[in-house]
Amino acid sequence: MEEKFALITGTSSGLGLATAQMLLEQGWTVIGVSRSGSEIEHENYIDILCDIKDEPSVEEMYRLVSENTDQLDLIILNAGIFNMAPIVETSTQEFNDHLQTNVVGAYHILKHSLNFLLEDNSHIVTISSIAAKMGMGNLAAYSASKYALTGMIESLKAEWRDYGFRFSTLFPGAIATGLWENIESEIEFPKEQMMEIEDVLNVLDMVINSSSRVQFSEVIFTHKQGVIR
């Protein structure tokens, strides 16, 4: 089997960590990118510390990637931050932090990826959110960043059309990860109405291992009880 390389952002915990483990089990060589590093110990796992908000840090990350491979068959844009607050209680810094991580960070990753992408082969998978499809209270900063991310990806699809890359974007509903434990809110979030990470991995597995002729422009999926409001 020909060696396949995947770059995943946000692999220190949660969905990014689980996705990296899934791909390693499937025989991929995985390059994990995060600010704090990953607990994964595997001969085919390459752990790179990188702050995707910082362009020089991303450039250095790709320099380290080049020491291991000159090709990326798959990029998964997973890193992001999520906070809840009414807009009047959201500071300008908090709003900017969402844009810097969720949009500018992805921009840095994509901007410097082109020399590693393979024409008619490479697949760019974006983990977005249902919050990019509908307005929900107390999520102004997060929703704004995810709507902007969608716009950037759609523009890039048109710009890079002739390369034959695949672009798939996932818009999941709430996922039961440790992320919710850090949310300061008076609202009780029913975990029984959230998807498990395994549910999302099932969808990701389908998207990643589909025919090379197929891309999934919009995959919207939630818990069977719908969106938590």
Image (spheres, rainbow, N blue to C red):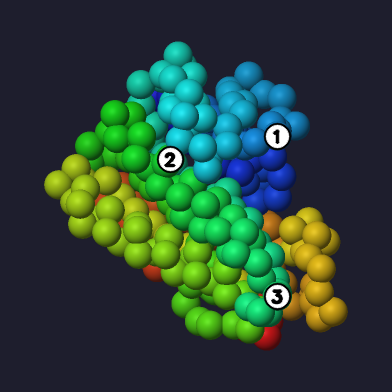
Task: Give the x, y percent position of residue 209.
Answer: 44, 48
Report the side of 218 relative to 54 (left or right): left
- Give neighbour class at mark 1: few <14, some 14-19, many 20+ (Cα, 10 Å): some
Identify the residue position indicated by label 3 in the image: 89
- Give neighbour class at mark 2: few <14, some 14-19, many 20+ (Cα, 10 Å): many
Task: Give the x, y percent position of residue 27.
Answer: 54, 31
Q: In the image, what residue occupies the spot 59% across and 26% down? A: 48
| First-in-chain label (2 vs 1) | 1
Q: 68 or 207: nearer the eye?
A: 68
Instruction: Point out the image quarter for the N terminus.
Output: top left
Q: CA distance from mark 2 to mark 1?
A: 17 Å
Report the side of 59 relative to 52 (left or right): left
Can the viewer see residue 3? yes
Q: Which residue is situated farthest in the left direction here?
A: 162
Task: Give the x, y percent position of residue 176.
Answer: 74, 64
| First-in-chain label (1 vs 3) | 1
Identify the residue position indicated by label 1 in the image: 36
Between label 1 and label 3, give the one nearer the viewer.
3
Type of residue at label 2?
Ile
Report the side of 21 relative to 123 (left or right): right
Q: 214 or 129: nearer the eye?
A: 129
Task: Give the x, y percent position of residue 150.
Answer: 40, 64
Q: Identify the secondary structure beneath mark 2.
A: helix
Q: Identify the secondary structure beneath mark 3.
A: helix
Q: CA distance from mark 1 to mark 3?
A: 29 Å
| First-in-chain label (2 vs 3) | 3
- Is 109 rendered above or below residue 1? below
User: Toward which corner of the image does residue 37 lie, by quadrant?
Assistant: top right
Type of residue at label 3?
Glu
Type of residue at label 1?
Ser
Identify the residue position indicated by label 2 in the image: 109
Q: In the image, what residue occupies the spot 60% across and 64% down? A: 92
